[in-house]
Image (cartoon, helix red, strand yellow):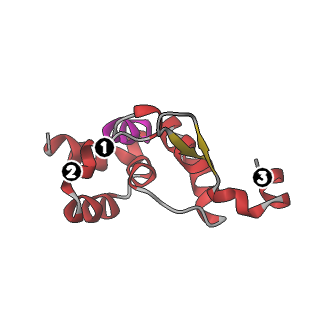
Amino acid sequence: MKELLEAEPALVNAANDWGGGDWETALGAAAHMGHRDIALFLLERGARIDLFAASMLGQLETVQAILSADPDSRRFPGPHGISLIAHAEAGGKEAAPVRDYLKSLE
């Protein structure tokens, strides 16, 4: 991935359409798989943060700000239909405050 981004930096925000409106970026893939190191690398290279990646990374203030502006977005599915709370759970202990916050909203 690092070599690919060195050769083609614009790929950092490329998205794949898996069909049926299921779009996924490299950051989205890292987020639902819980790959914090990859997500941080992509963000350092200019990837655009989204609610799902912020949840996996444990960025509680970011998640709270987005949900304050758009409360219904907590119900929207991420790539492959994976829920927001599943992204927070994939983040492990670093994302526990986000997971707990999301559970408090249920």
Q: In screen coordinates, is 60 left or right of 42?
A: left
**81 w.r.t. 12: above or below:** above
In the rendered image, the residue lying farthest to the front is 20
In this rendering, position of residue 8 left or right of residue 14 = right
Q: Residue at x 21, y 48 (%)?
A: 101
Q: Is residue 17 magenta?
A: no
Q: Earlier in the sequence, mark 3 or mark 2?
A: 3
Pick the residue in front: 47 or 96. Answer: 47
**Residue 19 lies in quadrant:** top right
- Crowd rating for badge 2 (residues with CA inside 10 Å; few <14, some 14–19, many 20+): few
Mark linked to residue 85: none
Which residues, given as a range, are shown in magenta? 84-91
Residue drawn at point x = 43 percent, y = 36 percent: 90
Assign the C terminus to one quadrant of the image. Answer: top left
Whether 88 is among the magenta residues is yes
Q: Secondary structure at mark 3?
A: helix
Task: Tell me the kind of residue under disc 2.
Answer: Asp
Q: Is residue 29 above or below residue 10?
A: above
For the point 26% across and 47% down, the residue is 74
Q: Quadrant of residue 45?
A: bottom right
Residue position for label 1: 76
Given this view, does label 3 or label 1 mark the residue nearer the observer? 1
x, y (%) of residue 65? 27, 65
Q: Give the distance between the C-alpha atoms of the residues marked 1 and 2, in whole angstroms.
A: 7 Å
The residue wearing badge 2 is: 72
Residue 93 place in picture, x, y as percent: 39, 42
Secondary structure character of the magenta stretch overall? helix
Crowd class of label 3 (few under 14; some 14 to 19; many from 20; radius 10 Å): few
Can you identify the residue that label 3 sits on? 2
Task: Return the residue nearer the eye: 62 or 81.
Answer: 81
